[in-house]
Image (spheres, grey):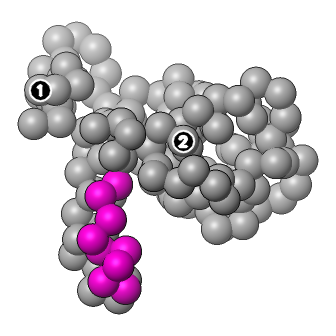
Amino acid sequence: QFRKTLKLPKKQDFSGKSSYNDMVLEDVLCQEITQLSYSGHINKASEFKRTNLQGHWHTLFTILNRCLTGKATGTNSTSVFVLRMFHAVAYNRHCDYALLFWNDLTEVVIDKRKPSKARKFVPFQRFL
């Protein structure tokens, strides 16, 4: 349904074009984000702080983070999901956005370690 709604092609729908790029691992993700005028060093996504981004990268990240999360305040840190989206846009990667959305939605519902309040939260409410 995400693919249909967002008008995204399926993996086998590429005619002569390269298919989606693989999702980058978290350590590569962090390394490449530091190359986007990030004033600091991050080893894990949880160490990321929006205030360390400079100029237009700060603005782009803020827009993505606010649109894809339900947070109105405390938007300085984010999840790996939003960082992957930001990375894909910043580096112009052909990313399977529908798969990213689906994985993040199912993770919230399936992960029993999360408190029940967190599992009742509907991600991407502004976007959807």
Image position of 115 (left or right of 7): right
Badge 1 density bin: few <14, some 14–19, many ≥20, Cα 10 Å: few
In this rendering, the answer to whether 48 lies above or below 14 is below
User: Is residue 120 magenta-colored?
Assistant: yes
User: Percent from the top left, x then y, of residue 88?
Assistant: 51, 34
Image position of 44 (left or right of 103): right
Kind of element beneath mark 1? helix
Task: Give the CA separation, mark 2 to mark 1.
Answer: 24 Å
Say which label, 2 or 1, has the lower sequence index. 1
- Residue sitting at x 38%, y 39%: 126
Q: Is 82 on the left-hand or right-hand side of 77?
A: left
Magenta stretch containing residue 66, yes or no? no
Marking on residue 4: 1
Where is residue 120? Give x, y as percent.
27, 71
Q: Residue at x 53, y 54 (%)?
A: 71
Q: What are the residue bounds of the magenta stretch?
A: 115-123
Count how many numbered circles sit on residues in the image: 2
Amino acid type of disc 2?
Arg
The residue under the point 28% across, 27% down is 19
Q: Are marks 2 and 1 in contact (CB under 8 Å)?
A: no
Q: Which residue is mark 2?
A: 66
Q: Position of residue 123 (x, y in %)?
A: 34, 54
- Nearer to the camera, 126 or 58: 126
Residue 15 image-quadrant placement: top left
Q: Position of residue 13 (x, y in %)?
A: 12, 21
Quarter of the picture holding the N terminus: top left
